[in-house]
Structures are given as C-alpha cells and as structure tokens.
Amino acid sequence: MIKKLVFPSSLLLIAYALWFSPDFNQIAAGVAIFLFGMLFLEQGFQGFTGGTLEKILRASTNKRWKSLMFGMLSTTVMQSSSLVTVITISFLSVGILDLAAGIGIIFGANLGTTTGAWLIAGLGLKVKIATYAMPMLIFGIFLVFQKSKPLKAIGSILAGMGFLFLGIHYMKEGFDAFRDTINLAEYALTGARGLFVFTLIGIGMTVVMQSSHAAMVLIITALSVQQITYDNALALAIGSNIGTTVTAIIGSMSANVAGKRLAAAHLLFNLVTALVALLMLEQFMLAVDSIAAAMNIAADDVTLKLAIFHSLFNLVGILIMLPFIDLLVRQIERLLKGKQVQIDKPKYLNDEAMKFPDTVVLAVHKETVRLYRHASHIILKTIGLSSVRVFSDKDLDGLLHINKKLVAYDVDKAYKHHIKDIYSEVIAFISQASFTWEMKQSGKLYWLREANRHIVEAIKDSKQLQHNLLLMNASSNTSIQQEYYKIRYQIAELLRELDVFRLQVESDESGANILSFDIFKVKIKQQDEAMNQQIDKLIREHKITAAAGTSLINDSAYMYAIKRHLVDMAETIFVVQKHKLAAVEREVALDDNELADVLKEL
C-alpha cells in the first residue's frame, strides 16, 4: 500500500514544485539528467559482464578483506552502489557468493560510494564541469550506435559520465538561481530537532531518487551555494545512507532467501552506522575538523568537510561491524529461513539471476547439478542402493551383497517430487534467457539444456529397467542373477566414478577435462558388448531360456542407455566452467564412429 502511494505522491510533489518556482525546473532537470547518466553508466558496465565477472568475483571474495576491497573498488569505478548491490544479490542468489562474502562487498560498497562525494566536492564544484561533459557525450553517443558490444559498452560509460557531469552543472546553476526565489537556508533547523527532521528528509529524497549518489550530489551542490547549512547537510548525508538500503530491499524482493538475507544485513549495517553517527555527531565534527586541517583544507570549505564526514562515519561503521560478520550471518540465517516444500522447486532460477548473462548460465548450471544429484538418488534407489553409501569409500560388492533383496521404488512419485518442476523451470528459464539476451553464453545454455534432457531420459530408462530387476532378481537361476548383479554393479560404479570426477572439477584438480569422458565412453561400450556376448553364450549353452535372454538383452540396452545419458550429461555440467579449454578439447574428443574404431583395435 505504501509503495503504491509513494509514486503518485512524488509526481504530485514534483509537479507542484515546478509550478511554484520556474527556477526549480533547472534543479529538477539536473537531477533527471544525473539519474539518466546513472542508467547509461550501469548499462555500460553490464556490457562487460559476459564471462569475466564470475572469475573476478570468485578471485576477489575468497577472503573477507578481498570482499571489502572488491565492494569499495567496484563502487568507486562504477560510481553506483546500487549496481554493485544488484550484482551481489544476483550472484548470491545463484550460490557463487556466500552470505559473509556478500556482506563484505556491501560494507566495501558503502565506503566506495563516498568517493563520489570527494569527486564532486573536490573537482565538480571547482571547475566548469559542463565543458568536460560535452566531449564525453559526443564520443559516447557515437560509440553507442556501433555494432560492436564492447564499443557500445564504452560508449554507454562515456555518455553516462557526460550526463553525470551535465546533471551536476545544472543542479549547481539551479540552486544558484533558486536562491533568488527562495533561500532554503532560512528553514534551517538546529539541535536534535534539526538532526531528526533532516535525517528523515535525507531518507525520503534517496528513496524517491533510488540513488544515494544522486542524493549526495544534490546535498553537496545545495551546500556549495549556502542553500542548506553544514549541520543540516550532515544530517541529510546520514539519512541518504539509510535510504540507499531501499535499493537492496527492492532488489531482493524477486530474489531467493539468500538475496533477502543480504538486504537485511545491508539495512542493519546502515542503521547501526547511522545511529553511531547521530549519537556521536559532535565527536565526528571535531574529527572532521582535525582531518581537514591536516589535509590543508580551508575551515570554510564545507563541501570537502562533508565528504570527509561521509567517508569517516562509513569507515567507523565498518570497523564496528566487521568483527561481528559471522554472528550477523548466523542470526540472519536463523531469522530468515528458506521455505520447506514437499515438491522440490528451483533454488537458483529467479529474476535476479536473469539480470546478467553470467548469472543466467551459472543459475542454470547449478540447477542442473541439483537435478543430477536428485537423479543419482532416484537411479540408485531403483537398483536397491542409496547415494549416501555408494558415494563413500564402501566396497560396492559388499553393498550389493548386503542389499540383495530389491524393494519396489516409486519412480513416478520421485520424478514428480524431485525432478519435474525443476526440469520444466530450467527449460522455461533458458528459453526466456535466449529471448532476453543476445549473448555468447547461448552455446553453453544449449549444452546445459541437452544435459537436463539426458538426466530425464536416464530416469525414464531406469524406470523401464526396474520392472525386470524386481522380477528377475528373485530368480533361482544363478546365471540370470549374476547378469542382473552386473547391471546393478555397473550403474552404481559409473555413478560413483562420475561423483569422484565432479569433486575433482569442483576442487580444480588437474586432469579433470573433457577428454576424460572418452575413457568412460570406451568402458561402457566394452561392457555393453561383453554383456551381449555373455548373454548369447548363456543361451547357446542352455543356461538361460531364449525368453530370459531376450529380457536380459533389453535390460542391458536400458543399462547402456542410462550410462550413456549420464556420461553425456556429465560431459557438459562438469566442464562448463572450463568452456574455452573444452571447445578445443571437443575437437580432439572421440565421436561415435571413432569410438567404434578404437574398440575394434582393442
């Protein structure tokens, strides 16, 4: 309800202000141009997320201090804590980041966003910034219309910077002119009342503009022409810090529980930081004066002193909260728990993951791995084994002898509960992503879609196999028992080997590459031919009937299909993170005809 009222109320307020004072038009135009520049800047940086952002995040967030530095540096470069927050929520939602790393990035982003105040107070108000804006706009717009995506991205960044500079110029000029109409400094408030009122105003203006950076520019430009007092400007800066958390909260609404946890941590951090700044404002002001004097900043240069204050109270907030990150993570995870559902739903597919090409692929990849883990459990259950025991160091022969008696397993029910919804959502998500993004990752999405199909086909084949397994396993014919024992053993053995391979890839051990799958393909083909030869021999020697032999041949075919689907699936999902190397390796990997030639020579 409140969200619905904010938008029309804001429009009415702006319309009234424009009607009340023509001079306000220039300030409003400056804010609009500045925010338009922010959009251009964000689009430009998004253009460079195609394949490298994941690597940067992985390398930059494996330690807490690295997370802080990444947040600070990325916000300094992009000049948008909102974009950094959205990126962090997106990658957290697909499981690339853990909550502690995400919180570290947000802490750093809060400090990084204060560099904007330094740039504006130190440079933007000291020179005629509009003269720098024009060349950036000219070259930027020219590059935006080029076909090359990197050139388009560079053009968007240049145009964004140009619009930012132009917006600052119009805001400064507007406040100068507005002073002739009405002097806002006359409405200054002092003491605790002023602190409270202007903090609320700072929150409100940041919520409306959806950018703390834009709010700080407005505060600094107003302060530079004495439209607001220094004391009230400090309160506005504190309010803008609280207001910026709204971006994270809105961004987390479409995210999974991990994104919501990060938004909660962001809100808590900014509230604690603001509370410390409000309670210790006099001490902060004394510290700012001392720092300004040490930096040879004039005592009346209130815009630079505001920039010092903005950086100082954010830095103090980080120093206070940093030792408690682990405690914060535990408490937030305890309070915000994921939904417990009977039917498995996608965990990583959400609107946040759709915002960047990198996160689209990562979300689909992680969801496919989840699907594979569920499928492994189902397939092993159909042959009377559990994934916990098979994916251990226990002897497979021993496990099969312990579990000689098979119990019927409802594959249809398991499929409905653990596979169907995830599989459907993955296919729909890939289709939507292909429509939304013209991206080089489309090849990887195609392979991942095929991997999902292989998983589903393997489950269907295991269902077909289960009927005869239950029937023939109870046979008194030892030859039949032995052949069905081989079927169970070979499926379990392959799943164990694939799980070992998965762990090697995840731990980045050498030797885990696409060429390794030629070994799997040769092995399962040899096993298939050996079993068919053995069945022929058993029929010839009258150890089994022709009818039993036919059933065995069919079931051997189901086994081979299950194993081949699993290998083809694993070939994609376990090497997707090494796609550049995999592209070269695919050229030398064996196709089916070459595989047959190899088998003839063995």
Image (spheres, rainbow, N blue to C red):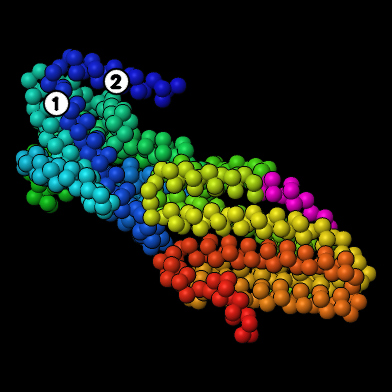
Q: Secondary structure at mark 2?
A: helix
Which residues, given as a range, are shown in magenta? 407-418
- Hey, what amino acid is under mark 1? Gln
Q: Is residue 40 left or right of residue 275?
A: left
What crowding class fits label 2: few (fewer than 14 Cα within 10 Å), some (14-19), or many (20 or more)? few
Picture residue at 36% right of the left edge, 54% below the top: 50
Residue 138: percent from the left, percent from the top?
A: 12, 43
Image quadrant in which the N terminus is located:
top left
In whole angstroms, how far apart are the C-alphas of marks 1 and 2? Answer: 17 Å
Question: 244 or 12, which lies in front?
Answer: 12
Pointer 1: what residue? Answer: 26
Looking at the image, do the residues carrying marks 1 and 2 touch, with CB atoms under 8 Å apart? no
Residue 397: percent from the left, percent from the top?
A: 77, 75
Provide the major secondary structure of the magenta segment: helix
Picture residue at 63% right of the left edge, 63% below the top: 566
Q: Is residue 289 visible?
A: no
Question: 97 or 291, which lies in front?
Answer: 97
Pointer 2: what residue? Answer: 11
Quarter of the image where one finds residue 456: bottom right
* Mark nearer the N terminus (1 vs 2): 2
| Magenta region includes residue 170 | no
Residue 531: percent from the left, percent from the top?
A: 76, 75
- Hey, what amino acid is under mark 2? Leu
